[in-house]
Image: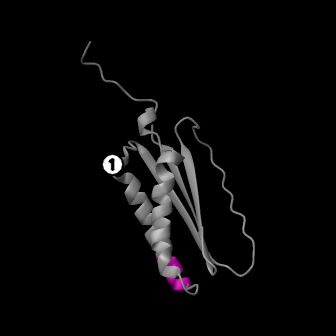
């Protein structure tokens, strides 16, 4: 009977993607990259930073040190110029609330805002 395979059908609590584990990592990367946008808003720089932020966050969580085994990550980042306008951002997902999660982080200065959402979806 020891030759039977064990299949994990639920994520272990220690391997779960949670806000507590992810928030500071996302915030650090977002703040580090956005320091390049400290003066005036630049559309070309914003596009470049957007790609870099998304890739950096995704690569960071793929790293085995976080132990997010079998998770797929979707990183969505918005960078825009502040001109006195308001902004509302929403999303809708169908997922398993026991294993999947989303973490949102905001950043802003007097000229620019950035919003980053990271979805961790457990791959069964």
Name the residue rendered at 56%, 52% in the picture: 103
Q: Position of residue 43 (x, y in %)?
A: 56, 84
Residue 70: % across, % down: 40, 42
Quarter residue 4 falls in = top left
Query: Residue at the location (57% across, 37% down)?
Result: 96
Q: Residue at x 55, y 35 (%)?
A: 98
Residue found farthest to the left: 3
Report the front residue among 79 and 31: 31
Q: Quadrant of the C terminus?
A: top left
Above or below, 25 relative to 70: below
Q: Secondary structure at mark 1?
A: helix
Give the labeled residue for mark 1. Answer: 65
Image quadrant occupied by the N terminus = top left
Magenta span dominant secondary structure: helix
Residue 11 locus on image (x, y percent):
45, 34
Q: For residue 45: magenta?
A: yes
What colour-coding does the image apply?
one colour
Instruction: Give the magenta part as a residue range.
Output: 43-48
User: Is residue 97 shown left or right of residue 48?
Assistant: right
Residue 81 against residue 16 in the figure, above or below: below
Direction right: furthest residue: 85
The location of residue 5, given as percent across then percent down, is: 30, 23
Q: Is residue 31 magenta?
A: no
Q: Residue at 53% of width from left, 82% of height from top?
A: 38
Rendered view: 83 above or below 89: below
């Amino acid at each position: 009977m020891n030759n039977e395979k064990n299949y994990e059908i639920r994520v272990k609590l220690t391997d779960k993607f949670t806000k507590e584990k992810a928030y500071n990592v996302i915030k650090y990367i977002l703040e580090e990259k956005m320091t390049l946008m400290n003066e005036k808003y630049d559309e070309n720089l914003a596009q470049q930073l957007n790609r870099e932020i998304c890739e950096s966050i995704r690569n960071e969580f793929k790293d085995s040190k976080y132990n997010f085994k079998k998770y797929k990550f979707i990183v969505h980042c918005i960078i825009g110029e502040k001109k006195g306008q308001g902004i509302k951002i929403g999303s809708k997902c169908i997922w398993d609330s026991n294993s999947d999660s989303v973490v949102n982080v905001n950043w802003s200065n007097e000229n620019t805002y950035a919003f980053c959402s990271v979805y961790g979806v457990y791959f069964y």
